[in-house]
Image (cartoon, rainbow, N blue to C red):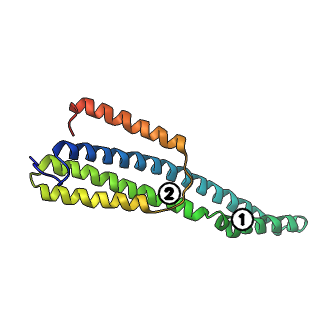
Amino acid sequence: MIAHIEESMNHEQFLVELKERERFADCHSRYYADRATLYNRVDYWTRGCIGVIALVGVGLTGLENWREIGAIMAGGCAIITTSLFPLFKWDSIVNGFNDSENEWTRIHKGYENVFSYYNISDKAEILVQEFQRVKEMQNGAALSDKRLPYNSEKFKHYVQEVRDYHKEEDEINGGQA
């Protein structure tokens, strides 16, 4: 079908590289989806609890005997949300995980589309263009330095999960793409 995909690659090398890149993107997509979900939950509950404490503090300021304690509670919550969260760059961490999840999901879906083009198209030019486009997206994602917290154990878990998933998929498909 495709005699010459890229100058330095033959048909089998192209499929191997495509599978490796798709699995690499799948692993990153799953990892960042998990991290984004975790950090969004922590963000939601942390801000929710701080908000409730601040509201209780505001309510206590209306009572004469609890006015000082209420003001301290409300003021402390305001300091936490306006000073400590920015100090730890909390918003950029949460948004960074969300952005990385979206970026790696687009890359993973892009490689899946390349497989679809490979299976249905005889035009090598379209396949090569799509492959190069997704490859550039992946290279761009690798270069973007978001400085996000990294959990090596979780990442290893997803590497193994992707291997197991694709091993079963390869067995079902008989080793074909």
Element class at badge 1:
helix
Residue type, numbered disc 2: Phe
Against 144, residue 14 (above or below) is above
Left of 101 or right of it: where is 107?
Answer: left
**Residue on which disc 2 sits:** 97
Inspect this view and state whether residue 58 appears. Answer: no
Against 173, residue 73 (above or below) is below
Which residue is outermost to the right? 65
Q: Indicate the position of residue 118 as horizontal and vertical percent values.
A: 16, 49
Left of 172 or right of it: where is 159?
Answer: right
Against 42, residue 84 (above or below) is below
Q: Indicate the position of residue 45 as horizontal and vertical percent values.
A: 62, 54
Instruction: Mark 2 vs mark 1: give the one in front.
Output: 2
**Residue on which disc 1 sits:** 80
Residue drawn at the location 73% of the way across and 60% of the way down: 53
Q: Which mark is residue 37?
A: none
Inspect this view and state whether residue 92 appears. Answer: yes
Residue type, numbered disc 1: Ile
Q: Between residue 8 and residue 90, name the one nearer to us.
A: 8
Indicate the quadrant where residue 72 lies.
bottom right
Q: Between residue 58 and residue 94, name the one nearer to us.
A: 94
Residue drawn at the location 58% of the way across and 64% of the way down: 91
Q: Indicate the position of residue 83 as horizontal and vertical percent values.
A: 70, 69
Element class at badge 2:
helix
- The local crowd at label 2, few if under 14, some if 14 to 19, many if 20 or more residues have their Cα within 10 Å, is many
Indicate the quadrant where residue 16 lies.
top left
